[in-house]
Image: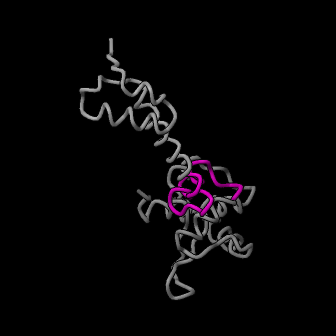
Amino acid sequence: MPPKRADIWGSFHQSDEKPNGHHYRATHWRCIDAERPSTVAIDIELENNWELMKNEEWFEAALASALSKKKDVNGEKGAMAAHLRRCELATAEEKALATRTAPTKREREEAEKREKAKRKQADDGEGDVEADDEGIGGSIRKFALARSGLMRPDDLHQTHHLS
């Protein structure tokens, strides 16, 4: 299940206006923090709550600097996720959030391949522990194994019991 809308906004500052009439502008908090004057001490509290940065006297100038460098994006999940993917300041957690929120076509294909491999491995693992053919589905499993080449056809008629 994809994350809630608010999850990705946790990494971004939301502007007060909607320039395109539909979306707020979003600026990555870490990109704003990178514009902080070098004379200002680093505040560890900001890592835990980026909203505190708005109260700092240098915030407006840092935000303006980030905006002038085109570090803001439309406040839609795809654009914000794309920013997090390519931003050198984004953490691994933020990049993972971007993948969960708005996966690219390649990420979706890779996830499908992994899921398919898991299902195949689970299906292949079913034949490893075989009940006797009197059990429900025993002969069906043997037939499927024979068709897949994991069991020889002449073994179909032999009875195997678990010890």
Image point (64%, 54%), residue name: 90
In the displayed structure, 34 sits above or below 13; it is above
Image point (52%, 84%), residue name: 18
Highlighted range, magenta: 87-111
Image quarter in which the N terminus is found: bottom left
In front: 152, or 114?
Answer: 152
Magenta stretch: residue 95 in it?
A: yes
Question: Horizontal placement of 141 versus 113: left or right?
Answer: left
Image location (x, y in percent) of residue 99: 56, 56
Of all residues, the one furthest to the top in this rendering is 163
Q: Quadrant of residue 78?
A: bottom right
Image point (47%, 34%), residue name: 124
Image location (x, y in percent) of residue 121: 49, 36
Of all residues, the one furthest to the bottom in this rendering is 21
Image quarter in which the C terminus is found: top left
In front: 132, or 96?
Answer: 132
In front: 30, or 90?
Answer: 90
